Amino acid sequence: MIAQLAPFHFERPLWLLALLPAAALWLLDRHGSDALLKWQRVIDPALLAHLVVGESRRPVATPANALLVVWMLAGIAVAGPAWQREPSPFADAKPAVAVVLKVTQSMLTEDLAPTRLDRARQKLADILAAREGAATSLIAYAGSAHLVLPPTPDSIVVLDLAKSLSPEIMPREGDDLAGALALAKRALASHADGGSILIMADELGPDIDGRLADSRSPSVTILSLLGPESGAERFGEAARALNASVVATTADQSDVTAVVYRLDRADQAPGIDGEGQHWREAGYWLTPLIALLALLWFRRGWVLA
């Protein structure tokens, strides 16, 4: 029992300060309602004891005492006493992902029918269907990077915007992956789970700065949009620089399964407070007792004056 109560604490301890005015008001009421204090100033205490008629002891069941108890119980309940953990209702929620889609002329190559860009859209549709309800952001890049859509669970909007992307609407040619990754990190900054980044590209520039990947960066997965004869080994140097895993595009759903597995495990690193758990507050157990004490004020003759 003692071991179970060892982690006992209050989730909102500042609410315990509300007990101070309760105690102060109770002391003021107790002092002001004591009629004997007035007589003790003019009559000797030894003589006063023989002059008092009736009970000299104060009654315990008074409105002031009951109000103090109710106030203290309510303050403790609101402060949130807790000593046990329970699974978070959002523990099974899928982590967010920022999809970084390369939109260049090379993505129109037809080694992946109908084109690499179209195959990327098809794979994206399969990934979103497998991660239904997960927040997804879309970033398009070529010579410049652009946030197309902030994180949203609406996969239909993500796919519609992805279908509207083409190299013709990009401001300039190039490979601004660094700018795209910076936008992806910013888009995921508001998510407590950190999320992950999915790069969908046919090739990555050789001058990737390894500083783009640090201990605080979201995990990165690269979906290689290359023909079967090209192979995914061309991403080796870039993957090492980004500390990313590379998944080669396949004709079946094995690549989608591999990508989804990595994206869903993006929040598996244990946190300080225990991943997927929170403290179970026990203050609500005091509410029936507070309600029972409150019924005293419906009793005839029970007056707080």
Image (spheres, rainbow, N blue to C red):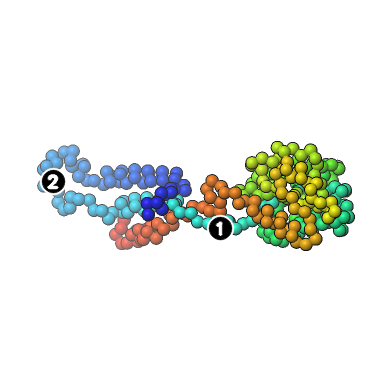
Q: Secondary structure at mark 2?
A: helix
Residue 225 screen position, x and y as percent: 81, 52
Q: Is residue 275 visible?
A: yes
Label number found at residue 203 = none
Mark toward the start of the polypeptide (1 vs 2): 2
Residue drawn where x is 37% and y is 43% of the image: 20
C-alpha separation, residue under disc 1 versus residue under disc 2: 64 Å
Q: Nearer the viewer, mark 1 or mark 2?
A: 1
Residue bearing the label numbered 1: 89
Establish if 62 lies above or below 174: below
Amino acid under label 2? Ala
Residue bearing the label numbered 2: 49
70 relative to 35 in the view: left or right: right
Residue 48 screen position, x and y as percent: 13, 44
Q: Secondary structure at mark 1?
A: loop
Residue drawn where x is 36% and y is 46% of the image: 22
Establish if 45 lies above or below 229: above
Mark 2 residue crowding within 10 angstroms, few (<14) / some (14–19) / many (20+): few
Residue drawn where x is 20% and y is 50% of the image: 57
Residue 131 screen position, x and y as percent: 68, 59
136 relative to 234 in the view: left or right: left
Q: In front here: 239 or 165?
A: 239
Amino acid under label 1? Pro
Residue 232 screen position, x and y as percent: 79, 50
Q: In front here: 7 or 135?
A: 7
